[in-house]
Structures are given as C-alpha cells and as structure tokens.
Amino acid sequence: MNSMNTYPGVRAVQKGPAPGTVRDAFRIRPLPLQWFRGIGSAVAAGVPTLVGALTGHLDYGLCASIGGFAFLYVGSETYRQRAIKLACVALGLSLTFGLGAISAATPWLMVLLFGLIGALAVFGFGAFQMAGPSAMFFILTFSVGTSLPYDLHALPLRTLLVLAGGAFAWIVGMSGWLLRPHGPETKVVAGAYRSLAACVDAIGTDLYPEKRYQAAVQLRAADAAVSGGELRWRRNYGPTLRLMALTRKANEMFMAAVEISLDRQAAKVPAGTAASLLSIADRLQHPQQEVLQPKAAADSPNGHVRRLSGLLNEAAAICLGEAAGRVKAEEVTLPPSFSLRRLLSGALNPHSALLHTSLRYGIMIAVAAAVAYSLDLNRSYWVPLSCTAVMLGTTVLGTTHRAIQRTAGTVIGLFLGAFILSLRPEGIYIALIMAVLQFIIELIYLRNYALAVIFITPSSLLIAESSHPDMAVSFFISARLTDILIGSAIGIIGMFFLWRRASSSKLPRALAGVIRMEGKLLESILSSSPSSRVTTLTNELETALIRLRLLYDGALAESVGRRNQASSWWPALDAVQHIGYAVITAAGNAQSHAASGDAVSDCSVFFEQMAQAAERQLPPDPANIPALSSIPALQHELAGLHEALQIRDRTAQSPVLKSS
C-alpha cells in the first residue's frame, strides 16, 4: 500500500483496528474485577428479599428486589449526576412494572409496550451517552409485571414496592459519597492520565492511532465528569478545581503529543514520560503514592518535546498540591451547561446510527413478544427478554457473540440451577443465594458475558420457582432453554434484516462531513476568527472525530463477509483523524496562524474537493495542496488525505474486495 504514494514524504498509513471474529465470544477480557458493582448489586437485590423473607412476605421482597436493579445503572458519573440518574431509573423501573401489570390482560397492548419501552430506552441512553445495561432492566421489569396474576387492587402496593427497592438502590449507589465524595470523577481523571500515558508511549508505532483515539475518548469523559460536579455552583471548591486543572493539563499534553507525532523529524519523547503520567494517575487514587519526576527535556532541540515536558512538570505540581500548581477559579472555563436541544440534535444527526438502532431494537422486541404470546409458551416473557439481551450487541457480529454466549451460558447454568433448586431453599436461604449469585454476576460480567449467564440462569429459575412453588423444576428448566433459543434467534434475524448496514452506509457521508468541519476550523484559524467561534468549531470537531471512529468500528462489525469493504476506508479515515487532531492542535496553540486570503480560499476549495470525493466514493481529481507555511506538518497530512482517497478507490476496485 505504501508503494502507491503519489506525494513524496507522505506518512505511511498506520495499521487499523483488528476486526472481531466469532471466536471472540469466548475470549476472557483482561479487565479488573468489578468489586463495587458486585457488592453493591448483591446488597441492593439481596436486602429487600431478605427483609421480605424475615417478615413472612417473600413475594413482597422479590418485588422490591426488582427495583434494586436500578443500582446496575451506576457508572463513572459524579455523585451529583448519579443522584439524578438513579432517581430517574428507579422511577422508570416502577413505571414500566406498573405498565406491565396493567397491560397483562391485553395482549396487543402488551406487545406494543414491549417494543415502545425498548426503543425509547435505547434511544434515551444513547442520546445521553450513558454506558450501562440500557433497555435491559426496563424490559425485565415490564416482563415481570406482565407475568404476575392480573390484580389491579394489588397494583399500587406492588408498584410502590418496586419504587422502594429503587430508593434503596439509590442509597446503596450513593453510599460511596460518605467516604470519597469525589471518587467517581477522580477515577475518570486517573483513567485519562493512564490512556494519555499509553498514547505517548505509542508515538511512532502502529498502535498510535488506536491509543490516540482511546486517549481522546477518556479525556472527553474526564471533561464531562469534572465539569458536571460541584464547580457548577462552587467555583472556589479546591478538590474539584484541582481535578479540572489536571484535566486541562492532560488535554494540553495530548495536543503536545499530537504535535510530536506529526513532526517530520521523528522527535523522541523523553524516557520516563509515560511512567510519570502513570504515577500521577496512581497518586490521584492512592495519595500515598509518589509522583515520578520526568527526565528533563530543557536541552531538547524539539520545541514540542520541551512543551510536553514542561506541561508534565506543571501537572505533577498540581497533583502534589504545590504552590506553583495551585489553581484559581477564574482560570478555569467550564464547558456549556446541559442543553436538551444540543443533545437531541446530536442523537438525530444524519450520520448517527442511533435512530436505526432504537427502531430495530423496538421492532424486534415487539416481534419476539408477539411470537412468544401467540405460541402460548411457558414463561413467555423470557423470549423478548432474551431478544433484548442479545441485541445489546448492536451489530451483526456483536449480536452473534451475545447469542452464542447467552446460549452456552444458559446450558451450563441450567445444571447449576437444577442443583440449587434440588436443595429446596426457602425464606432467607433464597435471599442469600440470590445475593451471592448477583455478586458473582456483576463481578465477572465485563470479562465475559457467557460466564455471567451461567449465574444469571439459576437466579432467574430461583425467582420463577419461588413465585410458583407448585410447579416442577423440570418445567422451568425446559421453558428457560426453549425461550432463550427462540429469543436469541429472533434477535439475530432482526439484526440481519433490519438496517444491517446502518453504519457502513453512513460512513462515506460522515467522513465527508468531518472533512468539511476540518476545513471550516482551519479557515477560521487562518482568517483569525473570534476565539468563541474557533472554540465552538473545535468542540464540534472533537465530537465528530470520535463519532466517526465509532461509526467505522460499527461498519467493521456489521458482517464478516463485508468487512473488507469497510476496511478499505481505513486509509482515508486514518488521514482524516491525523488532520483533525492537527487542526485542533493548531486551534489551541497561542501562536498566530493568520494567512493570506488566497491561502484561505485554497483550503476551502481543497477540503470541499476531498469531501465530495468521499461522499461520491470516487477518487479525487488532481488537487492543489494549500501552502501552509505556519503549519508545515499539516500540509503533508493534506497530501496524505488526497493519496488515501486514491488508495481507497484502488482497494475498492480489487478483485478480492469485489468477491466479498
């Protein structure tokens, strides 16, 4: 591929992300065990059940434990954000439970609500960019409501019990505030420094584009976490000011790292830089840790290296609380506050696959419910619930992974469930077993879903058997296996037939859109536009670059047979990412980049030509590369984009790609 270069000195295309395979379904990811989630979920689900058992109302306890699932929506948000989030989830769970109980006697309404709740939940969590189980537990709560005996007189009490369980989960989720009131945002900022260390360490290697992307995502998460905390109403609050200052320094160091990566002289990052960044991350979470001082770079001939070293020393001073690193409130600029209009405009962006994902989710859950209830299957609600679980994969490959994992985990889990039920647990033993199972599920969930399903299955069987002790254990086991297989199959079918290529079909237009945004920002820099406009365009471009990469990852996982077609866009996407971060770096640099009107006009024409080539999926015409004397590295990157779009066309025309 590199031999095709038209322009001398153009940077070689770096290796893209490796596409996933079906075998990845059985890979154990090397992620930390989730101790807080494990213990918290066990308490949130187990205590209500235990209280119910001790008071002689196990059914009440099981009902309240459903609200305890609200705890599973705890994320990396600040406690202020978590308080609002968990309260909304608890209310949502109680509402969906009530709707399930009301609609249980009207099959068509129940099927409609299954789809509507699933679609709205997926869209809502995607629009707010909240990680977590999305629609899963809203569908579960609705399902449980439909499965209970139809009794409108008991509905208010049951709904209040679910709400009470959600309120208890809120207390459990907020309990960490008593010990570490800034624990969540501190953890996110520490994660940003770890990602930055990996990014700096990868400069000059094929891993750099991936590590740069991960660092950009983590830095935006840190910005959101810190700015969403107490600085909104306590501008002089020291601990949060310190975190904001560290986040700002991390962003500046990221920009310096980008400049070093663009340097044509292959500048070397001082030894120990990554280790110093990691030591700052460790110090944030463990105050007794020492901060490693980076190797001095004052004598380095490269200005970008000297700048990175100086910023690292400033970050270390802030972390240690030294006088030189203290921050004043007036020095910190907060990002714009929450805007529903801005949020919805992003979610409904034509380059976003969220709307299609939400519609597909809702339609297939409704279909699964219709199939299950029309066939009058035993425990019919397990079918749409299984469909919900596997479609959390969001792509064909991801859904296939989830279906394989759920089926394999269920088969093994049925043996464990049969053993537990053979012991005939009652009362407090049911509560204790459920708590232990929930602890194990959340402890290992992120490592591999199949392992978690092994313990989800006996938990579901235990709840079902406790609600209907008069039925044989074999009844629940056969129903569970049948419903899991049907629900998983429906989920896979939906993924194959509904907007299967939602990501890949949007990729060319999204790429063109980002190219145009880069052109607008560069024009603003060169024409010395007001700083407010430059800042707005910079923020928009940062978001667009991350969304573009997410879209590419989605396209890569849409189909094993079509991944070569998606991969053919990587050279262009790699070039666009390099240009994007180079322009963002130029925007944040105090150095003036003002240029003549002809240079600005040349940039406008060039970026529009490249955008049209990407949009039409055609090779670009010979173009005049703008002369950028104040940003020489960027000029090489522009030539690289022109070359990358030509490479993409040649790759797309290859016999191998056509045969796929």
Image (cartoon, rainbow, N blue to C red):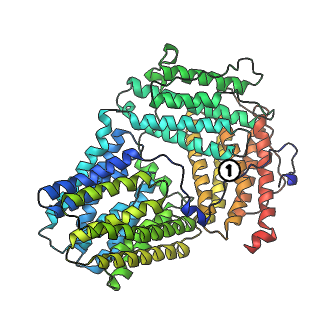
Where is 612 relative to 11, above or below?
Answer: below
> Is residue 359 at all visible to an observer of this figure?
no
Q: Secondary structure at mark 1?
A: helix
Residue 273 shows in the view: yes
Q: Give above or below for 25 relative to 204.
A: below
Q: Position of residue 203 (x, y in %)?
A: 70, 38
Q: Quadrant of residue 412?
A: bottom left
Q: Position of residue 258 (x, y in %)?
A: 68, 36
Q: Position of residue 471 (x, y in %)?
A: 23, 78
Of 521 and 546, nearer the camera is 546
- Farthest bottom residue? 375
Residue 234 locus on image (x, y percent): 35, 27
Quadrant where the C terminus is found in the figure: bottom right
In this rendering, position of residue 131 left or right of residue 251: left
Q: Name the residue at 44% across, 76% down.
A: 485
- Left/right of residue 375 with respect to residue 534 in the rendered view: left
Out of 419 and 305, give the one closest to the viewer.
419
Q: Which residue is mark 1?
A: 515
**Residue at screen point 55% across, 44% down:** 217
The answer to which quarter of the image holds residue 226 is top left
